[in-house]
Image (cartoon, rainbow, N blue to C red):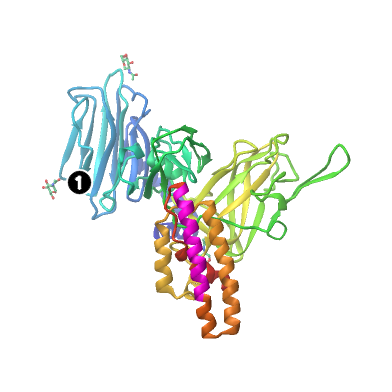
Amino acid sequence: MVPGARGGGARAAAAGPGLLALLLAVAAPLRLQAEELGDGCGYIVTYEDSGTMTSKNYPGTYPNHTVCEKTIRVPKGKRLILKLGDLDIESQTCASDYLLFTSSSDQYGPYCGSMTVPKELLLNTSEVTVRFESGSHISGRGFLLTYASSDHPDLITCLERANHYLKKEYSKFCPAGCKDIAGDISGNTMDGYRDTSLLCKAAIHAGIIADELGGQISVLQRKGISRYEGVLANGVLSRDGSLSDKRFLFTSNGCSRSLSLEPDRQITASSSWQWENEIGEQVHWSPGQARLQDQGPSWASGDSNNNHKQREWLEIDLGEKKKITGIRTAGSTQSNFNFYVESFVMNFKNNSKWQTYKGIVNNEEKVFQGNSNFRDPVQNNFIPPIVARYVRIVPQKWHQRIALKVELIGCQITQGNDSGNDWHKTSLNTGVSNEREDETIKKPIPSEEIAAGINFIAVAIPSVLLIALLLAGMGIVAAFRKRKEIHMDQLRLRKQAVGSRLNIPLPDISQLSLPSAMTMRRR
Ligand SMILES: *[C@@H]1O[C@H](CO)[C@@H](O)[C@H](O)[C@H]1NC(C)=O
Ligand SMILES: *[C@@H]1O[C@H](CO)[C@@H](O)[C@H](O)[C@H]1NC(C)=O
Ligand SMILES: *[C@@H]1O[C@H](CO)[C@@H](O)[C@H](O)[C@H]1NC(C)=O
């Protein structure tokens, strides 16, 4: 989203860490004084051109005699949109308890009590000062405010739920900072979310947007299901949910397939656990056992000491550079071995040097929240994706012993949007294939049945194609085309059958399969 800003920061840091630290040390207190005043401010997250802000203790009662003053801004030349998700200030006169917005040309408010407050304000400036003040009071949640630049007229607040909207399909803009706002979600990426769930928090859970960045979400409304399974993903816990009339799903960029691994060639580790059981057999928890889809014990590290200096790691070689958009991890999966990794960082090798995956906003090593028991898989997404051939999962905290099963999620570099890599792309006939890829971007995440269909055609077509190329006769190519059409028809029928059963529109296989068939052939 901000490659410029990110690169700039990295360059500055490399150029003179000492100078930068000094600048920050001097600038930080000044900025705080100028921009954020008083002890009445609660939670504030801002990024580029959007953000979220609350009064202290929100949604609990704000304290007596506090002030919160903060200037929020979007890039110069843009207009600021303010949206009040919630306002609950105990006062009828707004004398000592109020919320007020002041820009260079206008004033909005003071707002308080039961007065009607505009749900949305479109300012004609790029900057506004928010002031909240409280006197003595008994109750009141205070306020929750979100803002964005006028580039995002479809801004919603963190409190919007899917059942606020009637449309079958819609797109909205979530501000940065919705992850830690109180409110439930239930469901998961695959089955969908109960329609009572908060939209932006669900999008963070699903790995569609990153909490620290915010972003655009595309929502599909579907018929509800009888039960919603809650899982931990991207640091957000969704709850189990009961039957609802409606549910919703997010459309994804199409780069969310399981990347297949060969256990012994592609997975290695810093160490592994070997021991002798009661009947004298050697038991080995080797790296090859780290595939999430395999039954049996996981990989485990040789050393169980929590304080050792040397970092343990599990390394995956994908065979070629790939785009990795997420990871699913589980612990030992064995009830008599209560081992799991609670948090980890990701290293990846781009060319010759190992690098750590860092956050966009603070440029610090990003720590992912892992498992909370030995059994349940937990998903984390990489926004932006990791593009690399080699990745390492480096556990930071674990329970008893490091034990891991993993699955990487992603796609070939050519697939999905914004590949950031040209060598693969140029060998495709660019214009047409890019359009095709873009069309698939708006489609929902394919179900497992459909993924099998894609795999089938990705294997079937290249082998037919190879024979056709060997013989190189135009007539044979024509015959192949006919065969392909038959495959397509079969798949379309299958897709319809699957689609109507699941009641979700599935991606057009003929469009999905052609680029992947071509990639397979070139390898
Ligand atoms: C817009 O800005 C101008 C000054 O540049 C001001 O006079 C005007 O009242 C503003 N209008 C609104 C709707 O805020
Ligand atoms: C504010 O002060 C009043 C009187 O001292 C007290 O009754 C009330 O509970 C206080 N409110 C909060 C939110 O602390
Ligand atoms: C990976 O390497 C390429 C080419 O050397 C470079 O342009 C790119 O920025 C690198 N990517 C990352 C994430 O470091």
What secondary structure predominates along the stretch shown in magenta? Answer: helix
User: Which element carries disc 1, helix, strand or loop?
Assistant: loop
Q: Is residue 487 magenta?
A: yes
The answer as to whether callout 1 falls within 8 Å of ligand 1 is yes
Instruction: In this rendered view, identify the residue nearer to me: 466 or 338.
Output: 466
Disc 1 marks which residue? Answer: 123
Q: Is residue 125 magenta?
A: no
Report the amino acid beneath label 1: Leu
Q: Which residues are magenta?
A: 481-501
Where residue 452 appears, as percent x and y from the top left, is 56, 57
Where residue 308 appears, as percent x and y from the top left, is 70, 42
Pick the quarter of the image with the C terminus: bottom right
Q: Is residue 210 left or right of residue 126?
A: right
Q: Pointer 1: residues within 10 angstroms few (<14), some, or many (20+)?
A: many
Where residue 358 appears, as percent x and y from the top left, is 51, 52
262 over 213 or under it: above or below: below
Instruction: In this rendered view, identify the residue nearer to me: 246 or 98.
Output: 246
Instruction: In this rendered view, identify the residue nearer to me: 461 or 16.
Output: 461
- Residue shown at 65%/37% (left/top)? 374
Where residue 377 appears, as percent x and y from the top left, is 59, 42
Q: Is residue 487 left or right of residue 112?
A: right
Task: Let me know if residue 15 appears in the view.
Answer: no
- Residue shown at 27%/53% (left/top)? 151
